[in-house]
Image (cartoon, rainbow, N blue to C red):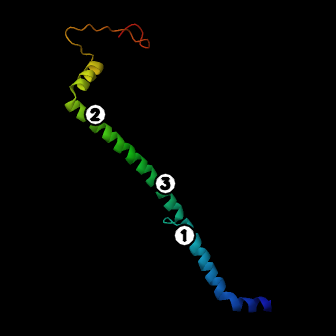
């Protein structure tokens, strides 16, 4: 017992500092602003950047389509014919029944 008492007298400061150091390391790892949350934030940033890039590309496509609608008469005519079913006065439009809807349209 005397040897243990002598040992503790010599290293008590080292044991306290070691304990404080261990608590600090655990606190850094588990804390809300620790490395775990930093990794989650980086992953979230990567996802947001991917969404941003997709939206930028979609915006560029929509801008190009808007410019074509304003300036390209052939594109506009093709779009009106396809989506609205319009035809010129001298054209005959054939409508075939859609196989999935049955015989009626």
Give the structural element (helix, strand or loop) at label 2: helix
Q: Residue at x 70, y 91 (%)?
A: 10
Q: Give the crowd class for mark 2: few <14, some 14-19, many >=20 residues within 10 Å.
A: some
75 relative to 36 in the view: left or right: left
Of the image marks 2 and 1, the number of the one nearer the N terminus: 1
The x and y percentages for residue 26 are 59, 70
Q: Which mark is residue 45?
A: none
Q: Label 2, on which residue?
A: 65
Q: Residue 21, relative to residue 37: is it above or below? A: below
Foreground mark, 3 or 1? 3
Q: Which mark is residue 28?
A: 1
Give the structural element (helix, strand or loop) at label 3: helix
Q: Give the crowd class for mark 3: few <14, some 14-19, many >=20 residues within 10 Å.
A: few
Q: Are marks 2 and 3 in contact (CB under 8 Å)?
A: no
Foreground mark, 2 or 1? 2
Of the image marks 2 and 3, the number of the one nearer the N terminus: 3
Q: Residue at x 24, y 13 (%)?
A: 87
Question: Could you say which quadrant of the image residue 12 lies in?
Answer: bottom right
Q: Label 3, on which residue?
A: 43
79 relative to 11 in the view: left or right: left
Give the structural element (helix, strand or loop) at label 1: helix
Question: Could you say which quadrant of the image residue 91 lies in?
Answer: top left
Of the image marks 3 and 1, the number of the one nearer the N terminus: 1
Q: Residue 35, relative to residue 90: is it above or below? A: below
The x and y percentages for residue 20 are 59, 79
Q: Residue at x 64, y 88 (%)?
A: 13
The x and y percentages for residue 1 are 80, 89
Q: Give the crowd class for mark 1: few <14, some 14-19, many >=20 residues within 10 Å.
A: some
């Amino acid at each position: 017992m005397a040897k243990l008492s002598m040992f503790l007298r010599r290293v008590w400061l080292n044991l306290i500092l070691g304990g404080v150091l261990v608590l600090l390391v655990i606190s850094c790892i588990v804390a809300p602003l620790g490395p775990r949350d930093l990794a989650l934030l980086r992953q979230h940033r990567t996802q947001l950047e991917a969404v941003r890039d997709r939206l930028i590309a979609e915006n560029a496509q929509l801008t190009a389509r808007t410019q074509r609608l304003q300036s390209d008469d052939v594109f506009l005519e093709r779009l009106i014919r396809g989506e609205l079913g319009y035809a010129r006065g001298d054209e005959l439009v054939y409508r075939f029944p859609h196989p999935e809807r049955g015989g009626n349209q």
